[in-house]
Image (tube, helix red, strand yellow):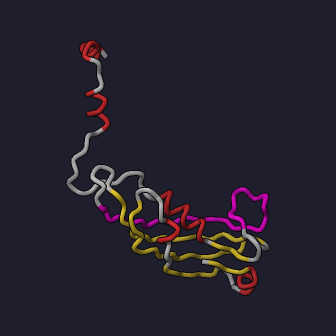
Amino acid sequence: MKFTLAQLNKFSFPYSFSEDMNLSDDLEGIEDILKVLEVKVTGIITSLYEDCYKIDFTLHAKLILECAASLKEVPYTIDTTFSEKFSIDKDDEDAFLIEGQTLDTKEAIITNLLISKPTKVYAEGENFISDEEVKEEKINPAFKSLKDLL
């Protein structure tokens, strides 16, 4: 979603918006995201001061992720809320930069979607070796009897 500064100056705040987004091309190449089925974003824009805005987002996304064990397709839904600050001030490290005359929310939405996505998913019924089983298998037999002393 993009808003020009001229548009934002005409809004009465708080301003609400809602949009379906196509992020397939933007998320292509992320190793475990196979498909982006749906991304719905709603938000409320609040003016903090001149050319500085806070947006409270609600993100709903349906993805197809890759199973970490079998590489099968796993449907996964993300429902999250987050707030971001947007400013023309290049020195404001806590804000996404409004470049030129346009406030673009896409980078903030993608960033928060990726933060909300789990690092691994498993298809239902998949068998995998847990970290504990791997640790058990790696114990040197010469030291196995010492394990009971701890």
> Is 2 positioned to the left or the right of 101 in the image?
left
Write the residue at 71% across / 76% down.
Answer: 102
**Which quadrant is the C terminus positioned in?**
top left
Q: Residue furthest bottom?
A: 10
Is 5 part of what is drawn in magenta?
Answer: no
Give coordinates of residue 143: x percent, y percent. Answer: 29, 14
> Is 53 positioned to the left or the right of 113 in the image?
right
Is residue 44 shown above or below 120?
Answer: below
Between 22 and 79, the one lying in front of the other is 22
The number of numbered badges drawn on the structure is: 0
Main secondary structure found in the magenta portion: strand
**Which quadrant is the N terminus positioned in?**
bottom right
Between 41 and 106, the one lying in front of the other is 106
**Magenta part of the chain:** 73-97
Write the residue at 66% across / 69% down.
Answer: 54
Is residue 49 shown above or below 17?
Answer: above
Write the residue at 50% across / 77% down.
Answer: 21
